[in-house]
């Protein structure tokens, strides 16, 4: 469920820059963010478009979005 964007001092562009420039992100690792923050600061559709543009994969579970900052396939093991 997407929440309406809230006006915050953190712009959508700044939030995305933070997500994709973290140390783990820069090294092709895994980044975790709260789904409510994604919805609040960027909006789900914008976030998913940016993931797609970059060729990244993501999973959502228990209010967390796990971003795989690479283009490799993701397998759910159990």
Image (cartoon, helix red, strand yellow):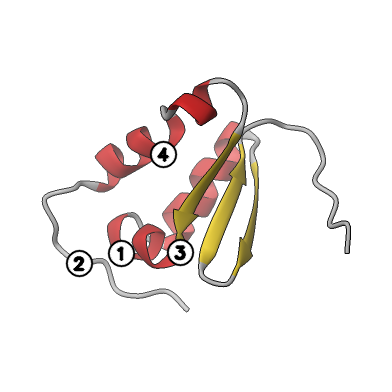
Q: Residue at x 42, y 74 (%)?
A: 2
Q: Residue at x 61, y 31 (%)?
A: 29
Going from N to C along the chain, the mark reached first, 4 or 3, is: 4
Label 4: few (<14), some or many (≥20) within 10 Å?
some
Closest to the camera, between mark 1 and mark 3, is 3
Residue labelled with disc 2: 6
The residue beneath circle 4 is 19
Of the image marks 2 and 3, the number of the one nearer the N terminus: 2
Mark 4–mark 3 CB contact (< 8 Å)? no
Q: Which mark is residue 60?
A: none
> Camera-side residue: 72 or 52?
72
Q: Closer to us: mark 2 or mark 4?
A: 4
Determine the CA span between mark 2 and mark 4: 18 Å
Name the side, left or right, on which 57 lies relative to 42: right
Compute the Cα span from label 1 to label 4: 14 Å
The spot of residue 20 in percent (x, y) is 45, 33
Secondary element type, mark 1: helix
Spatial separation of the CA atoms under disc 2 and disc 3? 14 Å
Q: Is residue 35 placed above or below 73 in the rendered structure?
A: below
Q: Earlier in the sequence, mark 2 or mark 4?
A: 2
Discs 1, 4 touching: Cβ within 8 Å: no
Query: Marks 2 and 1, how far apart in space?
Result: 6 Å
Residues at marks 4 and 3, CA–CA distance in whole angstroms: 13 Å
Position of 3 relative to 24 (above/below):
below
The numbered dot on residue 40 is 1
């Amino acid at each position: 469920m997407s929440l309406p964007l809230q006006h915050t001092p953190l712009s959508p562009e700044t939030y995305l820059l933070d997500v994709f420039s973290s140390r783990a992100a820069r090294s092709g690792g895994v980044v975790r963010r709260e789904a409510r923050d994604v919805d609040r600061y960027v909006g789900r559709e914008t976030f998913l478009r940016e993931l797609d543009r970059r060729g990244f994969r993501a999973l959502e579970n228990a209010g967390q979005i796990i971003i795989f900052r690479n283009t490799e396939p993701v397998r759910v093991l159990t």
